[in-house]
Image (tube, rainbow, N blue to C red):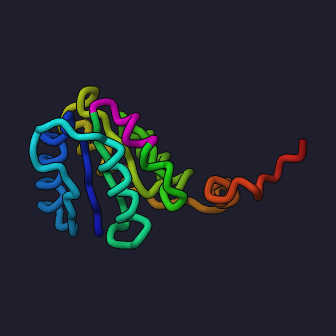
Amino acid sequence: MKIALASDHAAVDLKADLVRWLREQGHDVTDLGPQGAGSVDYPDYGYRLAAALADGSAEYGVALCGSGIGIAIAMNRHPAVRCAQVSEPLSASFARSHNDANAIALGARLIGPEMAKACVAAFLGTQFEAGRHQRRVDMLSHPSISQEQA
C-alpha cells in the first residue's frame, strides 16, 4: 500500500516510529514531515497530507498531532478526504468499514506507540463494506444529495 504520514511537532517521534514500522511491513511509505521537533503548524501538514491523498500519490494517510483533533479538522477541509480521529482499533476499523475513510488521525499525547500501531493495523486491514454505507459516504462528499426532506 502507498501510505503517507504527516504530523506536527508534538507527534514527530510517534510519526517516525510508525514510518519505520510500516516500512518493515513492506508498505511504500512517504513521510511528509516535519523531520524535527521545532514548532510547526498542524494545518500546513494536514493540508499537505490531504493533497497527497487527492492527487493519488498516497492511497491512505496517517495524520498525527498532539490530540489528533486539529490535524483531522484540517484534513477534512479537503473534499477528497475522509479522516477519522481514532484512539483505539475498533474505531479505526469502523472508519474504514462504514465510512470508507482514507485517513486516520492519532493523538501522540493521548496514545502510545503500540496503540498507534494497533490502530493503523486495524485501519489498513479493514475493507469498506459499501452496501448500505455507500449512499452515506456519497453524501459526505456531496452534501447536496441528502435524502432528507425538510
Residue that appears at 29% across and 68% down: 2
The N terminus: image quadrant:
bottom left
Q: In the displayed structure, would residue 88 be above or below residue 93?
A: above
Tell me residue 65's x, y (percent): 28, 37
Q: In the displayed structure, would residue 130 be above or below residue 14?
A: below
Residue that appears at 36% across and 61% down: 60
> Which stretch is magenta?
66-73
Q: Residue furthest bottom?
A: 56
Q: In the displayed structure, would residue 94 be above or below residue 87?
A: below
Can residue 11 be found in the magenta stretch? no
Tell me residue 125's x, y (percent): 36, 57
Magenta span: predominant SS is helix
Residue 124 in view here: no
- Between 131 and 86, the residue placed more toward the observer is 86
Tell me residue 78's x, y (percent): 49, 55
Residue that appears at 11% across and 55% down: 20
